[in-house]
C-alpha cells in the first residue's frame, strides 16, 4: 500500500503567522490528495483537495501545492487564527485499481496550535 | 452532501462482550468504509463494506473480530467482538461523496471504552 510521511507532528504558531505542513508519498500512480482537519472530539472534515493535473490550489487562507516529480505535497495556512487549531491529516486516494477504489491512506497527523 | 449518523455515539463496555455500531446515511451511496482511530493516533481503515457481499478487510483485521453488514445502500453495521481494552478507540464510518467518486466524508464516530 501507499506510504505517507507527514511532518511536523506538532506545530505552534502565533496568530497571524503562516503554517506549513508537508507530506511525501511513494506511489507515483497516486493522483488524489485531500487534506482533513479534525478538531478535538469531532469528525475529520475535508478542507481542500488537489488532483495530480494541478500544481496548486487555493481557497481563501488555505492553499495546497503538489510536486508530482518529487512526490510531495504541502498545506499552507496564512493569517492563522486560534480557530485553526486542530489536527491536520494529509491523505492520498489510492489509484483506481478496482479493489482499492475509495481507499484513503492517512498521514500521522499534525497538531497545529495557534496562540492568540 | 449526505448526512451521516452513527449509533451509539459512545459506550463503555466490559471485556469479552460485543458491541454493534450502526451507520446510517440519508441517501444511497456507492461505497461505505469503517475506520478505527486509537487515542491520539491517525485513522486506520478496517474494511470496505460491500452491499450484498462480504466486506473487504485490510491487513490486520479479520471478519471474526470485526463482522460487518451492509444490507442496503444507506446502512451498515460494524461489530467489535470479544472486546479487550486494546479495542478502546473511536470507530468511524465514511462514504464516498455522491457528487464525486473520490471525496470521502466521515460520520461523527463512536467512542468506545473497554474496561
Image (tube, coloured by chain):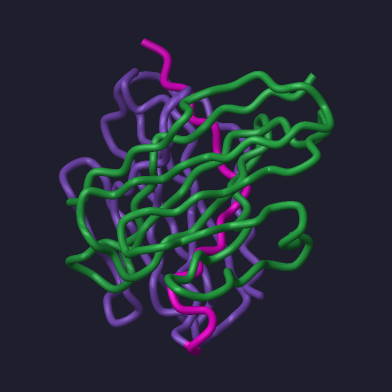
- Report x, y in % for residue A4: 61, 63
The chain whose colour is purple is: A
Q: Residue furthest top?
A: A116
| Vertical position of residue B108 compared to residue B12: above or below | below
Which picture quadrant has residue B61? Answer: bottom right
Q: Quadrant of the C terminus of chain B?
A: top right
Question: Above or below — where is A20 with respect to A83?
Answer: below
Q: Which residue is rendered at x = 76% and y = 58% of the image?
A: B64
Residue bounds of the magenta highlight: A97-116
Q: Which residue is found at the position 44% from the left and 85% from the top? A: A96
Residue located 83% across and 32% down the image:
B16
Residue B107 figure quarter: top left
Residue B65 screen position, x and y as percent: 76, 52
Whether residue A55 sits left or right of residue A85 in the image: it is left
Residue beneath the point at 26% across and 30% down:
A79
B68 above or below B115? Answer: below
- Location of residue B102 by image quarter: bottom left
Residue B79 or residue A45, whichever sits in front = B79
Image spot of residue A21 (x, y percent): 48, 47
Of the pair A110 and B43, the residue shown nearer to us: B43
Horizontal side of B63 relative to B110 (left or right) equals right
Q: Is residue B11 magenta?
A: no
Residue A36 as seen in the image, left or right of residue B21: left
Q: In the displayed structure, does residue B105 sit left or right of residue B60?
A: left
Numbered disc total: 0
Give me the chain that's green.
B
Of A80 and B5, which appears nearest the observer? B5
Given residues A50 and B105, the one toward you in this image is: B105
x%, y% of residue B42? 61, 44
Amino acid at each position: 500500500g501507499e506510504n505517507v510521511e507527514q511532518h511536523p507532528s506538532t506545530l505552534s504558531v502565533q496568530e497571524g503567522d503562516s503554517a506549513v505542513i508537508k507530506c511525501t508519498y511513494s506511489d507515483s500512480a497516486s493522483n488524489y490528495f485531500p487534506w482533513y482537519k479534525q478538531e478535538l472530539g469531532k469528525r475529520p472534515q475535508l478542507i481542500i483537495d488537489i488532483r495530480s493535473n494541478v500544481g496548486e490550489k487555493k481557497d481563501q487562507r488555505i492553499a495546497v501545492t503538489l510536486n508530482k516529480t518529487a512526490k510531495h505535497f504541502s498545506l499552507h495556512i496564512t493569517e492563522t487564527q486560534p480557530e485553526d487549531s486542530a489536527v491536520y491529516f494529509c491523505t492520498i486516494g489510492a489509484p483506481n485499481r478496482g479493489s482499492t477504489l475509495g481507499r484513503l491512506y492517512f498521514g500521522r497527523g499534525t497538531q497545529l496550535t495557534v496562540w492568540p | 452532501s449526505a448526512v451521516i449518523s452513527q449509533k451509539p455515539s459512545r459506550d463503555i463496555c466490559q471485556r469479552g462482550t460485543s458491541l454493534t455500531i450502526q451507520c446510517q446515511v440519508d441517501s444511497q451511496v456507492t461505497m461505505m468504509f469503517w475506520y478505527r482511530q486509537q487515542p491520539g493516533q491517525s485513522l486506520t481503515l478496517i474494511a470496505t463494506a460491500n452491499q450484498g457481499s462480504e466486506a473487504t478487510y485490510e491487513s490486520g483485521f479479520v471478519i471474526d473480530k470485526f463482522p460487518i453488514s451492509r444490507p442496503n445502500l444507506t446502512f451498515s453495521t460494524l461489530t467489535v467482538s470479544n472486546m479487550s481494552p486494546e479495542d478502546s478507540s473511536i470507530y468511524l464510518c465514511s462514504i464516498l461523496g455522491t457528487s464525486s467518486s473520490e471525496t470521502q466524508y466521515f460520520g461523527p464516530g463512536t467512542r468506545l471504552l473497554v474496561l
